[in-house]
């Protein structure tokens, strides 16, 4: 094989690897975002009373 063919193959491998990495990362972020939306909302009043005075 010529050097440019080897370099071209390596370049294609790196591009595929980067695309795979991006897909996995996006899937993790999507899973994390969906799990956050399923969490029950906390009451703000109990936290607010600790830090602020009643008007």
Image (cartoon, rainbow, N blue to C red):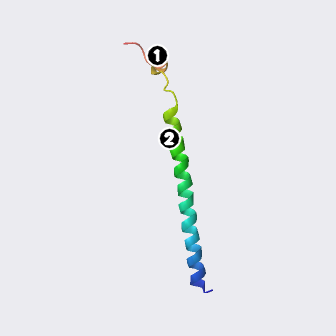
Residue at the far left in the pictured view: 55
Q: Residue at x 50, y 39 (%)?
A: 34
Residue corresponding to mark 2: 33
Q: Tell me, for residue 39, which label it has, or none.
A: none
- Is residue 14 shown above or below 50? below
SS label for mark 1: helix
Which quadrant holds residue 17? bottom right
Residue 22 on image: x %, y %: 53, 57
Residue at the far top in the pictured view: 54
Residue corresponding to mark 1: 49
- Is residue 9 shown above or below 43? below
Residue 11 on image: x %, y %: 56, 73
- Is residue 40 shown above or below 1? above
Q: CA distance from mark 1 to mark 2?
A: 29 Å
Q: Nearer the viewer, residue 43 or 53?
A: 43
Where does the N terminus fall, quadrant-wise?
Answer: bottom right
Residue 18 on image: x %, y %: 55, 62
Q: Give the crowd class for mark 1: few <14, some 14-19, many >=20 residues within 10 Å.
A: few
Q: Earlier in the sequence, mark 1 or mark 2?
A: 2
Residue 43 on image: x %, y %: 48, 21
């Amino acid at each position: 094989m010529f050097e440019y063919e080897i370099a071209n193959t390596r370049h294609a491998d790196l591009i595929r690897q980067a695309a795979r990495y991006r897909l996995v990362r996006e899937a993790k972020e999507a899973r994390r975002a969906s799990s956050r939306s399923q969490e029950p909302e906390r009451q703000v009043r109990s936290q607010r009373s600790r830090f602020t005075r009643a008007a």
